Image: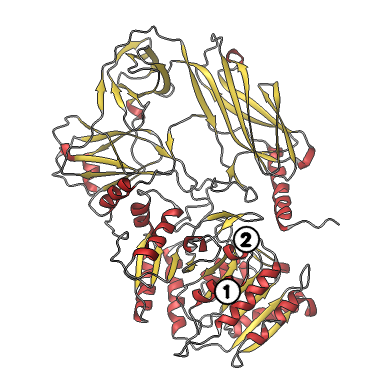
């Protein structure tokens, strides 16, 4: 029998499910014009300084989700915190540390209940978010305004222009793809059975003699060579070749008049048999399109000084915007006239060279996704000080206030930071895990008192944009990293400034989804401080499949002090049923520590020795052990659909764990065993006051005993790193 590595096994397991999906095919999907989006902002000293000023003052934060022309009335702005007496000339709008021009209607010099600001906004596309934050303030100087330019043009009109549309589905998450910081979501799986993908084209110029281009982007998954045959509307175009879990992109040129109005079918099929499994990344078509609006809007290209006429509008309220330079858009004076049963607009494109323009009707004017008052913050200030930094989400902040008060009563300085304030000060208001790392790094180097402990108080998800529709659980994000086997979460990354896999500050997480879960977790931590210390520990070993787990278990027992009685359970010697019952009975009776060495999965230990369902059903209230889990995937808390063992133990209503040390990834047992032993060498070293060390210090220092980068990076402390074991 062939023995596969953990990575090969993980990929093989997911490949089977992808093959099933591939046979179903996927003809649904949305085809959209390729929009202008911005990526991570360029950080300069000037932009940072400006942003700090915005974050520390009264401002209205405007969140948009797509490119377009936006309108916000004064009543909405005032409700979101704008001074109702603001001088309209002083209104300034910013995004990514750069001022964006606006227009004020109907009268730029008056600002009453009928007034509104209008502006052109860009969408944002990063792995962390598709929401872009704009900042509106009332300043002491005049703000930038959108210019209106004349619309005359001398060059003769063209019949059509080269339009690019794209279908980019995000249906499946492939943890086995190594692609750095890019997201791991892709479209329809493609196997040996052919898969049809519909791309919808509007207003195709069938008279054009030009060429169109179909670009097919694929992502390999199975660890084999890939040969994917491509056809368009039944006509074979060629084969894309690429290897393993790498991308494959190829462009095909076709006559424009071979395209159909409406649905065009791209057929994809792997040619290497059932082992050839990939996923569609994108389909992009550039074709010659007539100057005709679709749903009262059109993005198009024209040459400077070219006369342009666009028909197909349903009303006469049409505007034309030049967005060749998205940071400096301009409105073009245009003539609108009735034509047949609709309206057309005529104007001349300004400037030189190819221009990018947008024409849109009133019903295409957009409203923001979110409109809120800024909560002023100054975390990028050297006057701050803390021993413990609690980073949480606004919806959970009140719940964790009791934990902050508890730690302060024990002599620690505590700073509770709303994660949105971190985005505001360190990433222009836009969501990003890097913003959290930048705050922690800044605090470590610049605060009056540098923190020693960081608590990430809230859940995280590998699906921050909620592609799969399981819920918006990415409250306090984690960092997704590529390990030797899969992409997975690493919380220690936030404080690992030299990137050696060992954090410089002790990091922990309390993975609460809701305020109710957070309140319950804090109540557990609070009651633990006054509970009677338990005097026994339970060491559980899997049977020796691929590794001497019993031997690893035996080497732990002598590391416990004499006042702690140790019970060892070796599944291979007594059988699964007996071992499981002894485990559950032991947890119910009260343990200081439960340690497991063996094989695992997100939902539990091998052979269902302990499952998430078991964890949620525990009734050991007041007798909460620390769970130390030397196995794979028990801590994969970032999965939005699964309730993993670690989160189940932490969020159990009538019992569970006071803390869990577990891995989000797949790693090999030998370094786990060494780290496990080092953990207990450190845990029971009392200080001069007779205290055991704080838990985060132990987990952080235990990682230094090994060199395996993935074990170092993937073990997460689910719990408060500043707590001491009782």
Decide: few, some or many residues near mark 2? Use Cα within 10 Å; few <14, some 14-19, many ≥20. many
As drawn, 481 above or below 257? below
Residue 228's spot in the image, x, y percent? 71, 32
Residue 297's spot in the image, x, y percent? 40, 24
Looking at the image, residue 76 sits to the left or right of residue 313; the answer is left
Mark 1 sits on what residue? Answer: 702
Name the image colouring: secondary structure
Q: Nearer the viewer, mark 1 or mark 2?
A: 1
What is the total number of numbered labels drawn onto the structure image? 2
Mark 2 sits on what residue? Answer: 665
Looking at the image, residue 628 sits to the left or right of residue 347; the answer is right
Kindly state the secondary structure of the residue where label 2 is placed. Answer: loop
Looking at the image, residue 396 sits to the left or right of residue 498; the answer is left
As drawn, 156 above or below 693? above
| Disc ID at residue 324 | none
Looking at the image, residue 718 sits to the left or right of residue 73; the answer is right
Residue at 47% from the left image edge and 55% from the top image edge: 474
Between 19 and 568, the residue placed more toward the observer is: 568
The residue lying furthest to the bottom in this view is 563
Residue at 17% from the left image edge and 37% from the top image edge: 142
Residue 424 seen from this side = yes
Q: Quadrant of residue 551?
A: bottom right
Residue 590's spot in the image, x, y percent? 58, 84
Residue at 46% from the left image edge and 54% from the top image edge: 433
Q: Quadrant of residue 555?
A: bottom right
Disc 1 + disc 2, Cβ < 8 Å:
no
């Amino acid at each position: 029998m062939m023995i596969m590595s953990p990575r090969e096994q993980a990929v093989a397991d997911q490949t089977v499910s992808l093959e099933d999906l591939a046979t179903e095919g996927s003809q649904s999907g949305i085809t959209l014009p390729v929009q202008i989006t911005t990526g991570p902002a360029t950080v300069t000293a000037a932009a940072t300084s400006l942003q700090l000023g915005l974050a520390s003052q009264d401002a209205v934060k405007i969140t948009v989700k797509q490119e377009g022309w936006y309108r916000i009335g004064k009543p909405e702005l005032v409700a979101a915190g704008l001074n109702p007496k603001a001088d309209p000339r002083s209104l300034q709008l910013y995004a990514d540390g750069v001022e964006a021009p606006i227009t004020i209607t109907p009268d730029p010099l008056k600002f009453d209940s009928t007034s509104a600001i209008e502006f052109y906004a860009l969408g944002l596309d990063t792995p962390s978010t598709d929401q872009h934050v704009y900042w509106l303030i009332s300043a002491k100087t005049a703000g930038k305004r959108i210019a209106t330019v004349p619309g005359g043009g001398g060059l003769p009109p063209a019949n059509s222009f080269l339009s690019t549309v794209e279908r980019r589905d995000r249906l499946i998450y492939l943890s086995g793809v190594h692609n750095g910081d890019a997201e791991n979501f892709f479209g329809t799986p493609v196997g040996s059975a052919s898969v049809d993908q519909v791309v919808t084209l509007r207003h195709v110029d069938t008279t054009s003699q030009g060429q169109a281009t179909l670009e097919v982007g694929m992502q390999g998954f199975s660890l084999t060579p890939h040969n994917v045959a491509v056809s368009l509307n039944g006509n074979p175009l060629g084969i894309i070749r690429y290897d393993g879990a790498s991308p494959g992109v190829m462009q095909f040129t076709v006559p424009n008049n071979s395209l159909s109005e409406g649905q065009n079918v791209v057929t994809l099929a792997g040619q290497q048999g059932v082992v050839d499994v990939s996923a569609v990344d994108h389909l992009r078509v550039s074709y010659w399109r007539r100057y005709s609006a679709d749903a009262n809007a059109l993005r198009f290209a024209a040459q400077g000084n070219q006369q342009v006429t666009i028909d197909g509008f349903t009303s006469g309220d049409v505007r034309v915007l030049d967005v060749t330079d998205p940071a400096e858009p301009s409105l073009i004076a245009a003539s609108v006239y009735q034509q047949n049963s609709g309206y057309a607009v005529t104007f001349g494109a300004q400037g030189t060279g190819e221009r990018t323009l947008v024409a849109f009707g009133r019903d295409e004017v957009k409203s923001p996704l979110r409109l809120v008052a800024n909560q002023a913050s100054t975390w990028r200030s050297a006057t701050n000080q803390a021993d413990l930094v609690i980073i949480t989400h606004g919806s959970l902040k009140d719940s964790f206030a009791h934990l902050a008060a508890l730690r302060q009563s024990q002599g620690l300085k505590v700073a509770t930071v709303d994660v949105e304030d971190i985005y505001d000060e360190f990433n222009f208001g836009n969501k990003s895990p890097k913003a959290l790392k930048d705050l922690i790094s800044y605090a470590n180097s610049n605060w009056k008192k540098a923190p020693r402990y960081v608590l990430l108080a809230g859940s995280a998800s590998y699906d921050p944009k909620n592609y799969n529709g399981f819920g918006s659980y990415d409250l306090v994000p984690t960092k997704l990293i590529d390990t030797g086997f899969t992409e997975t979460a690493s919380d220690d990354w936030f404080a690992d400034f030299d990137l050696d896999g060992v954090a410089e500050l002790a990091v922990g997480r309390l993975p609460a989804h809701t305020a109710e879960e957070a309140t319950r977790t804090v109540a557990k931590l609070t009651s633990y401080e006054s509970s009677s210390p338990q005097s026994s520990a339970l060491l559980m070993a899997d049977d020796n499949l691929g590794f001497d787990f019993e031997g690893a278990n035996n080497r732990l027992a002598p590391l416990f002090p004499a006042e702690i009685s140790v019970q060892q359970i070796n599944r291979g010697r007594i059988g699964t049923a007996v071992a499981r019952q002894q485990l559950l009975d032991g947890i119910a009776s009260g343990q200081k520590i439960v340690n497991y060495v063996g094989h695992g999965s997100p939902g539990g230990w091998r052979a269902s020795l302990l499952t998430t369902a078991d964890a949620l059903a525990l009734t050991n209230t007041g007798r909460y052990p620390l769970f130390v889990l030397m196995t794979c995937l028990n801590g994969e808390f970032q999965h939005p659909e699964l309730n993993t063992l670690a989160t189940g133990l932490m969020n159990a209503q009538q019992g569970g764990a006071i803390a869990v040390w577990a891995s989000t990834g797949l790693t090999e047992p030998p370094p786990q065993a060494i780290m496990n032993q080092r953990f207990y060498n450190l845990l029971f070293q009392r200080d001069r006051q007779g205290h055991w060390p704080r838990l985060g210090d132990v987990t952080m220092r235990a990682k230094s005993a090994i060199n395996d980068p993935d074990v170092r990076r993937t073990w997460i402390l689910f719990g408060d790193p500043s707590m001491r074991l009782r």
